[in-house]
Amino acid sequence: MTTHHPLIIIGSGPAGFTAGIYAARADLAPLIFEGIQPGGQLTITTDVENFPGFPDGIMGPDLMDAMRKQAQRFGATTAYEMVTNIDFSKRPFAVTTDSKSYTADALILCTGASAITGGLPNEAELMGHGLSACATCDAFFFRGKEVVVVGGGDSAMEEAHFLTKFATKVTIVHRRDAFRASKTMQSRVLENPKINVIWNTEVVELIGSKETGLTAVTLQAKDGERTNFPTNGLFYAIGHKPNTDLFKGVLDMNEVGYLNVASPSSKTNVEGVFAAGDVCDPHYRQAISSAGAGCIAAMDAEHFLSSQVTSLV
């Protein structure tokens, strides 16, 4: 049996839930699929101190739970289902999950992007407890401490430079003998007295626990020699992967896979399909910017659906 909804939102997090709030208040009764990580990346973030309205900060999972309840209060339905296929070729769009089939007159895609990490065993346990993939989000918590940045591109240079505003020392660990970053970014980092670089080396182990936080990392040089390097924090800056595999070959995206939208709108190249949040934002990746984008997508979807009704009259 197939269930029909005027609007389906795929993905949660600040973008998905904000889209849900605005769409529900517009009487669109949206269905939100929360996906593999209900609440998005903020559910693995401990303290969120830069989201407006919370002067004392708020735990990431608590913020997402509050957004979920707010969307539900206005009439949004949330489902813990994983979307496995979408037929964009005709309207209503056909959406298949791991358990059911649905159709929708419009879609908002908020599937986000996942930080690329080192794939080490206890990363999930230490994420938010000394381990991070966003200096802008978490640097404040490392004021007066020593941290490590992994990476060699422009993102790594930007993260390291930003962290020097808070940390007493920043060590960049890079597996090669030269950075890939632009010359300007390299110069800014290499000339900073608070930044040290360890070349031809990889982080192969994280030492610590959720209770103690990260206390050290194990470094392995090219010759195989291993050493323990004490640190209070490690920031991965080796890129993000947008969660857009479902949309390949249909929706326009850049060379990395981020969806292209007709800015300042949230429209994709398929009429009736909108996108918001990290799935189409390779630059800012902040909870507040994602929430704003979710608002825009819901308003675009509401205008689209209203125009469809008007055209049928």
Image: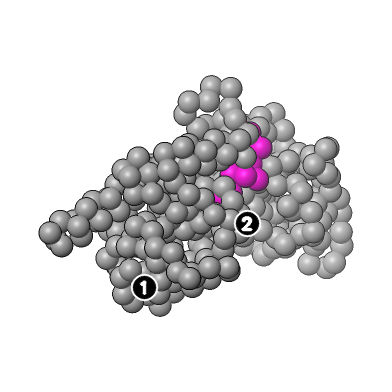
Judge left or right: residue 26 versus residue 245: left
Judge left or right: residue 169 versus residue 285: right
Disc 2 residue type (three-letter): Gly
In the rendered image, which quarter contains the C terminus? Answer: bottom left
Residue 72 in view of the camera: yes
Identify whether 58 is placed above or below 84. above
Which residue is at the far top? 55
Judge left or right: residue 231 versus residue 83: right
Q: Main secondary structure of the magenta part?
A: helix
Extent of the magenta region: 40-47
Disc 1 residue type (three-letter): Phe
Q: How many marks?
A: 2
- Is 170 colored magenta in this rendering? no
Could you tell me residue 21's position as x and y percent?
A: 41, 41
Q: Quadrant of residue 205?
A: bottom right
Taking the spot 51% from the left edge, 50% from the top edge, the residue there is: 78
What residue is disc 2 on? 151
Could you tell me residue 212's position as x and y percent?
A: 83, 37
Residue 251 in view of the camera: no
Q: Which tag, 1 or 2, sits closer to the chain's start?
A: 1
Taking the spot 40% from the left edge, 66% from the top edge, the residue there is: 103
Could you tell me residue 180's position as x and y percent?
A: 55, 62
Q: How is the image coloured?
A: one colour
Mark 2 lies on a secondary structure that is: loop
Q: Give the Cα separation between the discs numbered 1 and 2.
A: 37 Å
What residue is disc 1 on? 88
Mark 1 lies on a secondary structure that is: loop
Q: Residues within 10 Å of mark 2 (few under 14, many from 20)?
A: many
Q: Nearer the viewer, mark 1 or mark 2?
A: 1
Taking the spot 60% from the left edge, 59% from the top edge, the residue there is: 36
